[in-house]
Amino acid sequence: MKKLVVFTGAGISAESGLQTFRGADGLWEGYRVEDVATPQAWRADQARVLHFYNIRRQQCIAASPNAAHHALKALEEFYDVHIITQNIDDLHERAGSTRVLHLHGEIRKAQSSLNPRFVYNMAGDTLNIGDTCELGSQLRPHVVWFGEAVPNLEHAASITQAADIFVVIGSSLQVYPAANLLYETHRDCTVYLIDPEADVMRLDSSIIRIAKPATTGVELLRKILAE
């Protein structure tokens, strides 16, 4: 069974109603990224950061997987499918995908602000000041912020290096170091890019481009792979 590795970004979740990382006005849910997604922001105002991610978590819970998420799950019948995602939502898991690696954390988990190895599944949708881990430290969102290391990057590179087919869906390939995964594929790997802006992105000419949104693009990919 061929190994199909899928690298997903915000574009796949946007079709489920989740806002992409940064809007045209440079804001994320009305906030400056520097004020809610950095270690400095956490040190400056924990309550503001917690409130911001509480909103994101509630939106995630209210959203549902879309046709692209379900189509990737269906491909497991024919391929050894591994999903590497930049997204912090759990829509891939809720669609039934069995091998999902999150590069930037998971919004429905919390972690110790003292030791990031202490990670907890959240039963509810809010984190508040005073919610602590077993070490007694304040819980923070289980999210990789700007300026922090990406702990799963090495594992993701290893998965990518073994891919027979590598598919990028809904990613601008502008967020590093995650975007470097594209260059971890081996010479004989077939690479597809599904994104409405695929035709104008400056990438190697060998990449097969499908200039469509995730839902229609993945369905077209399924037809191509079936040929």
Image (spheres, rainbow, N blue to C red):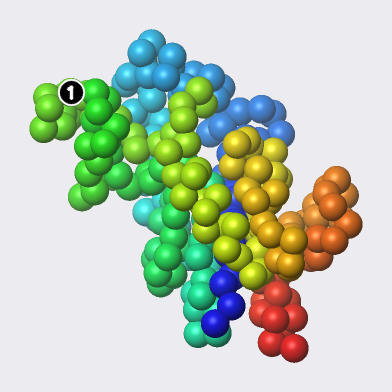
* Vertical position of residue 112 compared to residue 168: above or below: above
Q: Quadrant of residue 223?
A: bottom right
Frontmost residue, 95 versus 32: 95
Residue 9 at x, y = what percent? 60, 50
Tell me if mark 1 has few (under 14), some (14-19) or many (20+) residues whose alpha carbon lies within 10 angstroms of its own: some
Figure label count: 1
Quadrant of the snapshot with the C terminus: bottom right
Q: Can residue 210 be seen? A: yes
Q: Is residue 22 left or right of residue 39?
A: right
Q: Residue furthest top?
A: 44
Which residue is at a point 87% across and 49% down the rendered structure image? 200
Residue 204 at x, y = what percent? 84, 52
Q: Residue furthest front?
A: 187
Name the residue type under label 1: Ser
* Vertical position of residue 61 compared to residue 150: above or below: below
Which residue is at a point 42% across and 19% down the rendered structure image? 39
Residue 161 at x, y = what percent? 60, 57
Which residue is at a point 37% across and 54% down the rendered structure image? 61
Q: What residue does disc 1 label?
A: 137
Residue 132 at x, y = what percent? 16, 29
Quadrant of the snapshot with the N terminus: bottom right
Q: Does dot 1 land on a helix, a strand or a loop?
A: loop
Q: Quadrant of residue 191?
A: bottom right
Q: Residue furthest bottom?
A: 227
Frontmost residue, 123 versus 136: 136
Frontmost residue, 117 versus 209: 117
Q: Is residue 141 left or right of residue 227?
A: left
Which residue is at a point 12% across and 27% down the rendered structure image? 135
Q: Can residue 64 be seen? A: no
